[in-house]
Amino acid sequence: MALLHRAELRPSKLELLAGWLPGRQWFAGEAGAPVTRVAAYRFDDPAGEVGIETLLVRAGDGPVLQVPLTYRGAPLAGADEHLVGVIEHSVLGRRWAYDACGDPVYAPLLAAAVLADAGQAEEYFEVDGKREVRPVSMTLTGSRTGRPVPTGPVSAGPGDGGVTVVRVGDVELAVVRRPVPADVPEAGGLAGTWPGQDEPVLLAYAR
């Protein structure tokens, strides 16, 4: 489960992305246009230290873009090239936001969603000592391949056709940056729907 905080963020996540996205090779949309949120989903860090959120956004009237992010309370060593920016969080303090594809906590969780249909984390707020669950904004469906979830070294790099390739152990996963409706490959995949998008779009797949 992912604990959320009712907090003020400076800059906001969307403001941060408005400056970062146009510099990406896979960006599509109007540079400088406001970035709007379409939907989102989260994974849960087993250690409870890192926030892991994937935002589906648009820049102006552009297509939907998929941006997995991790939020950390301190800089991640050796990951400067993946840094999206720094956010001041009114509850948690300074948070370093990274492109999750370059963060080692993300890859095994993505692999579990793609290969074993591990799903998304339930999100909740603490209200007067009680949990208040926030409804999900989209539905995820993964494959049940029977393959073990991999462990081992993690790396990331650009791929062909607007994907980012994430490798964990001996498994290679493609994160689709401009997701559209597509068939899930036999090797395994993660698809999603949200209000207004009833036909599943392919979010990630095993290669």
Image: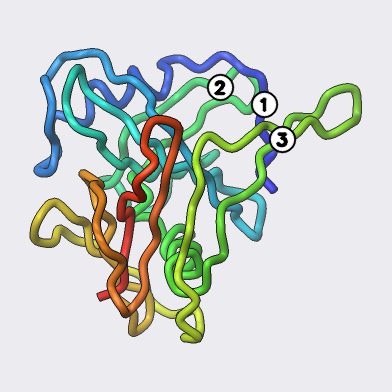
Which residue position is annotated with label 3? Answer: 124
Q: Amino acid at mark 3?
A: Tyr
Q: Are marks 2 and 1 in contact (CB under 8 Å)?
A: yes
Looking at this view, name the residue that lies furthest to the front: 198
Disc number placed over residue 143 in the picture, else none: none
For residue 65, side relative to residue 10 (left or right)? left
Which residue position is annotated with label 1? Answer: 5
Q: CA distance from mark 2 to mark 3?
A: 18 Å
Rendering coords of residue 118 (x, y %) = 57, 65
Q: Amino acid at mark 2?
A: His
81 lies above or below 145: above
> Nearer the observer, disc 2 or disc 3?
3
Q: Amino acid at mark 1?
A: His
Q: Is residue 95 visible?
A: yes
The image quadrant of residue 194 is: top left
Rendering coords of residue 129 (x, y %) = 91, 29
Rendering coords of residue 48 (x, y %) = 66, 51
Rendering coords of residue 131 (x, y %) = 83, 34
Residue at (36, 74) in percent of width and height: 188
Residue at (45, 58) in percent of width and height: 106
N-term mark: 2 or 3: 2
Question: Quick one: 141 or 153, which is closer to the camera?
Answer: 141
Q: Secondary structure at mark 3?
A: strand
N-term mark: 2 or 1: 1
Which residue position is annotated with label 2? Answer: 89
N-term mark: 3 or 1: 1
